[in-house]
Image (tube, helix red, strand yellow):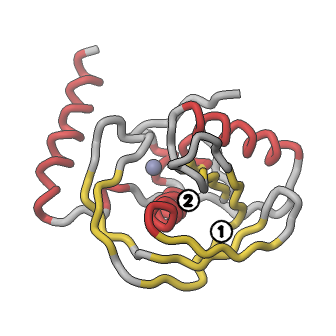
Amino acid sequence: MVLKIIKYPDAILRKKAVPVDKISEEIFKLADDMIETMLKEDGIGFAANQGGSLWRIFVINTTPHEDKPTPVVMINPEVLSQEGSVNAEEGCLSFPELYLAIVRPEKVRMHAKDLYNEDFVYEMDGILARAVFHEIDHLNGTLIIDHVGALEQDKVKKYVDGLHCKTTHT
Ligand SMILES: [Zn+2]
């Protein structure tokens, strides 16, 4: 099932997701729905908060530049180490049409469980490392607008004011 994507300023995007203690039917279904939603929207990643759930899960498409997607489910993800830094434009399905220059680590080494409770260590770089930090941020209630420097603050203000106008007039 494709989930309704929760958009800013919905309060759930500011909540901290809680660790998954048991991989139940609910978790299986949620992961499946999150993958379906991510692929339909052409996203590289999708965090549970964005689908209205507060479990520490995100999904990521590890082959974003290929025809065939390779979705991976990351449960209770943790960053083990990181390296370097890159400044690049980043978007978010919860902020349609907003793209902000954000500095993120270049490489990540992380740990997560899969749907079968197996432990995995992943090493990723480039756009995938960026996606991992973006999605872990979501699970902690942190959003792209929290990362911008002084130059981008104006862009964020205009975007947020625009949302405000839309909600007051429609
Ligand atoms: Zn996002």
Is the CB of mark 1 within 8 Å of ligand 1?
Answer: no
Picture quadrant of residue 158: top left
Q: Which residue is drawn at 88% across and 59% down?
A: 116
Q: Residue at x 60, y 56 (%)?
A: 62
Contact (Cβ within 8 Å) of mark 1 with mark 2: yes
Horizontally, residue 127 falls left or right of residue 96, namely right
Q: Where is residue 65 in the image (x, y as percent from the top left)?
A: 51, 49
Callout 1 crowding tier (Cα within 10 Å): few <14, some 14–19, many ≥20: many
Which one is in front, 112 or 123? Answer: 123
Which one is in front, 9 or 84? Answer: 84
The amino acid type of the residue labelled 2 equals Leu
Q: Earlier in the sequence, mark 1 or mark 2?
A: 1
Q: Where is residue 66 in the image (x, y as percent from the top left)?
A: 56, 46
Q: Which mark is residue 77?
A: 1
Which residue position is annotated with label 2?
A: 139
Callout 2 crowding tier (Cα within 10 Å): few <14, some 14–19, many ≥20: many
Picture quadrant of residue 109: bottom right
Residue placed farthest to the top in the image?
A: 170
Residue placed farthest to the front in the image?
A: 67
Q: Is residue 66 visible in the rendered structure shown here?
A: yes
Horizontally, residue 83 falls left or right of residue 24, namely left
